[in-house]
Amino acid sequence: MDHVEGSASTNKYIPVSSVTSGEGKEVAPGLYCYTNQIVNLCFVEDQKSKNSWVLVDAGMPDSTEKIIAEAEERFGKETVPKAIILTHAHFDHIGGIIGLLNRWDVPVYAHSLELPYVTGKKDYPKPDPSVEGGMVARMSFLFPNEAINLDKQVHPLPEDGSVPELPEWRWVHTPGHTEGHISLFREADQALIAGDAFITVKQEDLYSVITQHLEISGPPRYFTPDWMEAWKSVKKLHSLNPHTAVTGHGRPVSREWLDENLTKLAREFDRIAIPDYGKYVEGNQLEQ
């Protein structure tokens, strides 16, 4: 494997954290949620193949050693996943990936529309510090938006919705937060890895982020350029009737809380999720 490199901004530690940082929890059989500072990633086991697992997302910048330590704690020393799946490639979901790929010779998979952002061809829209929200939103001008280049390590997800190395799971295109954002769903027990399609913390508010105050929310406002697509994606996930959900930010949720609050979000997305002002809102026609 060739050595891969990221820009200084995508490798630099960002000093913001939460009370759940470093905690891990098995939320469904073979679905283990690990919180790295303010973002969740998942270790997902193939239930039919012993010691076969996949990493979903890759944490905050400078998180490589923490992710490897957690993987070794769960699966044993020198453990290596079969693949890394990206829900999307914002800095807080690919922060450790350069270091991981320099330790693990594994393929990375992302939606075809996300590939330009992980092959050095296209930067994300800049975050919007003017958006309605709170201190994290106002700080967002500090967050990297530059593409990284994983070159030949990254591949498009299969068009049939299957997930490499996880035959029980399928991917669902959930754009809005990014063009190629995906979520993962396991029909057998209706487990959902939502990425940032919806989250369970008000990510724009610093106090909520630090305390991980449980609250249904749309995708992080400062990094979401298409609110109508984001609403459609929430409705799509609601229609799956998930019983358990790991979101990109916030605490894992299940059953009554998830059903009640995801139903409310799908119905009242314009009130709950879409900000009253911001450069990606103003001038947009808001229609269901």
Image (cartoon, grey):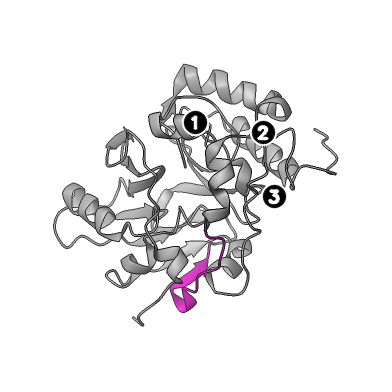
Q: Nearer the viewer, mark 3 or mark 2?
A: 3
Q: Earlier in the sequence, mark 1 or mark 3?
A: 1
Q: CA distance from mark 3 to mark 2?
A: 18 Å
What is the secondary structure assignment of the residue under circle 2?
Answer: helix
- Does the magenta segment cover residue 154? yes
Image position, residue 51 (x, y; %): 22, 54
Q: Earlier in the sequence, mark 1 or mark 2?
A: 1
Residue behind mark 1? 200
Q: Residue furthest left?
A: 77
User: From which residue to which does the magenta span run?
Assistant: 143-157
Does residue 14 show up?
yes
Q: Is residue 44 left or right of residue 257?
A: left
CB atoms at circles 1 and 2 under 8 Å apart?
no
Residue behind mark 3? 225
The kind of residue on which mark 1 rests is: Thr
Does residue 190 show up?
no
The kind of residue on which mark 3 rests is: Pro
